[in-house]
Amino acid sequence: MAPQHPDHPRPEAPARTPIRPGWPEIAVGLTTLVATTLALLFFGPLGPLDLDPVTYGLVVSAWSGIAGLAGFAAAVLVRRRPLAAFGVRRTTWRWMLVGAAGGVVALVAKGALTYAVTAVTGYGSDPQGAYYDAAGGGALALVLTVLFLSVVTPIGEEFLFRGVLTNALLRYGPVVGVVGGAVVFALFHGVNIVLPAAIVVGLVAGELMRRSGSIWPAVAVHTVNNLALPLLVLFTGATGPTG
């Protein structure tokens, strides 16, 4: 083989795309999420302690993000894949703006869907009423609610449900990946009035993650949606559908 001329260096090999997570990561991540929840219910502050509504709401607001991060961390440790394999990689400001816009679209769509479901079924019970209690507990409680709902929860839940679950399912195609991830995400919110709204958010977040290749636009979608609740309490004094 002829030696490489110094003026014509050998081209670098293209960067290898990190291998996606798979079923082991899904199983470990979701199991850790459930275990963290059970620990909170039976041994944590939601167990034997008699908390006032504001404190209870703050704990519930923080839980989903913390449990999601625990599930994500456990999934990463299964085979120690690089974070980029889970979509945790840099993105552009353009994609972040698209994510914020997608969050607004999802917010309007889920509001219309929730209104339609409520009108047809007459079901008005809101399982997220504790969030209203937390946001309405004064200035400090409102700030903490915004932090928990709009920062911690979007990061924790998106890292787990999009970064692990949707990324793993995308090996079977975009429909299975995005729709499957959204449905599982919604089911973990419970079979209640929140379920269709969670599916909408999951679909938008999953598709933007798939197209951008990064988890952060999905986090932006989630942040915009979750920020709406404490802002609603701040500007209208709302206490939720059940009053």
Image: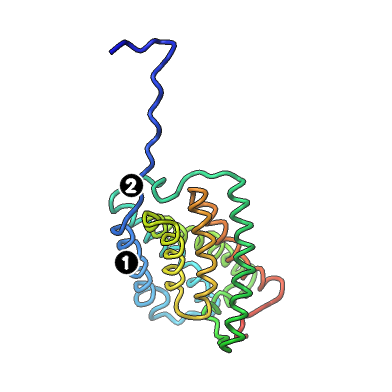
Residue at the image position 57 percent from the left and 56 percent from the top: 220
| Residue marked by disc 2 | 81
Q: Quadrant of the N terminus?
A: top left
Q: Residues within 10 Å of mark 2 (few under 14, many from 20)?
A: some
Residue at the image position 71 percent from the left and 75 percent from the top: 236
| Residue marked by disc 1 | 31
Where residue 202 appears, as percent x and y from the top left, is 50, 64
Where residue 92 appears, as percent x and y from the top left, is 57, 44
Q: Nearer the viewer, residue 202 or 61?
A: 202
Side of 145 relative to 76 (left or right): right
- Asked if residue 25 is positioned above or below residue 240 in the image, the reply reads above
Q: Secondary structure at mark 1?
A: helix
- Asked if residue 178 is positioned above or below residue 89 in the image, the reply reads below
**Which picture quadrant has residue 103?**
bottom right
Q: Secondary structure at mark 2?
A: loop
Residue type beneath disc 2: Arg
Side of 19 relative to 240 (left or right): left
Q: Are marks 1 and 2 in contact (CB under 8 Å)?
A: no
- Asked if residue 115 is positioned above or below residue 68 in the image, the reply reads below
Residue type beneath disc 1: Thr
Q: Nearer the viewer, residue 157 or 97?
A: 97
Where residue 30 appears, as percent x and y from the top left, is 35, 65
Where residue 173 appears, as percent x and y from the top left, is 41, 56
Q: Quadrant of the C terminus?
A: bottom right
- Asked if residue 156 is positioned above or below residue 5 in the image, the reply reads below
Q: Residues within 10 Å of mark 1 (few under 14, many from 20)?
A: some
**Which picture quadrant has residue 111?**
bottom right
Residue at the image position 35 percent from the left and 70 percent from the top: 34
